[in-house]
Amino acid sequence: MRFRFCGDLDCPDWVLAEISTLAKISSVKMKLLCAQVLKDLLGEGIDYDKVAKLTADAKFESGDIKASVAVLSFILSSAAKHDVDGESLSSELQQLGLPKEHVTGLCKSYEDKHSALQDKLRETSLRLGRLNSVSWRVDYTLSSSDLREVNEPLIQLKLQTQGAEPGSSETTVVSVSADKFRVLLAELKQAQAMMNALQ
Amino acid sequence: MSEQQNNHKQVFCFSSVVEEFGHIALESLRRGSSPKIYESAAKKLFVPMEMVQHGVEGLVFLLMESSKHMISEVNFLDCVLVLGFSEEVNRFLLKLYQEHQGQIRTIMKQLICSQPTYQNLEWRLDVQLASRLLRQQIVPTVVTRLFLTSGTDSSSRVLQTDPRTLLHIIYTLEAALAAVKTSHTRRILRNIK
């Protein structure tokens, strides 16, 4: 059986198994658990004490708690990844055997945070390096050891980049003559025009 | 067990101390030994530090070798009997071995990290539309970051491929997976189990 929220593939076996675990807690508690998992996916951190309290009634062991957090995490992030709308997610989860009240709660939370989740996933997508900041300075060379009157402007550019490895940053300092800088500026403006045309 | 290990066992004349040594031995297996612990134990027992160290090392060796070969209770007791300790010490050593055998085997499994293993793969699909020299291009590229871990160190490699090579990679890997299902492999797996 192919499911849209799994990217048109079969649903993984462990998800099927843990859906039955999820059915053991009440639908109200499940909605609160969803809220906690969504907070974690959006990078706000998860409060494990609250999760433990929510699952205490159903007498979940630590393995069950981890499993239910994992399966909710998978369902929500996978649905956001493949841009599944709330209704399709609802019908697919019911096909997998999750009770209707649980599904309604889950899909409501999902639809509320749908675009926030997609933005967060877009942010954390693979990026090889990022430009953090640019600073510049224009100097004017008056004279040098080779020539007494030089009288030329010179631009110093400092680029702060975040390197390919997460957490590493590099600083590049370049000095550019006026002509070269004009060429650089023209080319970058062309690239910018092309980027704007795409949007 | 070699003569050396036998000599190390001399310190186990004090059966009350064996428990303490057991704990120190397990901790050193888990986190590595520290001379401070040996020093404090040596002070408490009024014996030189080397004796404590040898005792702990001997105990660690005994536990590791027993766990490695997964020897049964009877065999373990036989081995320990040779050393000539009291019944109480023997029983305590057996209990220590049985309770922590699984843990010790897990720790030892982690020690043989030879090659980096797969941890995670992130990818992105980019399309180059233009460059400084040529406009109106369409060049799809898949950029991946492969996360590897060997024991506790983790590293990552950035790889880049075009879609055709990627399809070839997928095809080769699927053929590798299919090799698990051939009758030749199944025969061998049946014999191992």
Image: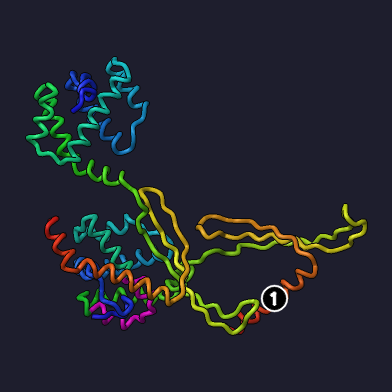
Between residues A129 and B71, which one lies in front from this camera angle?
B71
Between residues A86 and A151, which one lies in front from this camera angle?
A151
| Rendered position, B37 above or below B100 | above
Relative to B138, is A85 on the left or the right? Answer: left
| Rendered position, B66 above or below A137 | above
SS of the residue at dot 1? helix
Residue at the far top in the pictured view: B46
Q: State the image coordinates of residue B147 (x, y, percent, origin top left).
A: 41, 59
Q: State the image coordinates of residue A106 (x, y, percent, origin top left).
A: 31, 73
Q: Residue at x 42, y 66 (%)?
A: B122
Quarter assignment of residue B165: bottom left
Residue at the far front in the pictured view: B184
Quarter assignment of residue A72: bottom left
| Letter of the chain that mark 1 sits on in the rendering | A
**Prevalent SS, magenta region:** helix
Q: Residue at x 35, y 64 (%)?
A: A36
Q: What residue would you read off at disc 1?
A: A187
Q: Does the magenta run of residues contain A85?
A: yes
| Rendered position, B103 above or below B38 | below
Q: Residue at x 30, y 69 (%)?
A: A31
Q: Residue at x 35, y 59 (%)?
A: B118
Q: Does the magenta run of residues contain B181?
A: no
The quarter of the picture where the C terminus of chain B appears is: bottom left
Q: State the image coordinates of residue A120 (x, y, percent, origin top left).
A: 46, 69
Tell me the kind of residue under disc 1: Glu
Q: Which residues are magenta?
A: A75-94
The scheme the figure's colours follow is: rainbow
| Rendered position, A119 above or below B79 | below
The quarter of the picture where the N terminus of chain B appears is: top left
Relative to B31, is B102 on the left or the right? Answer: left
Between residues B162 and A196, which one lies in front from this camera angle?
B162
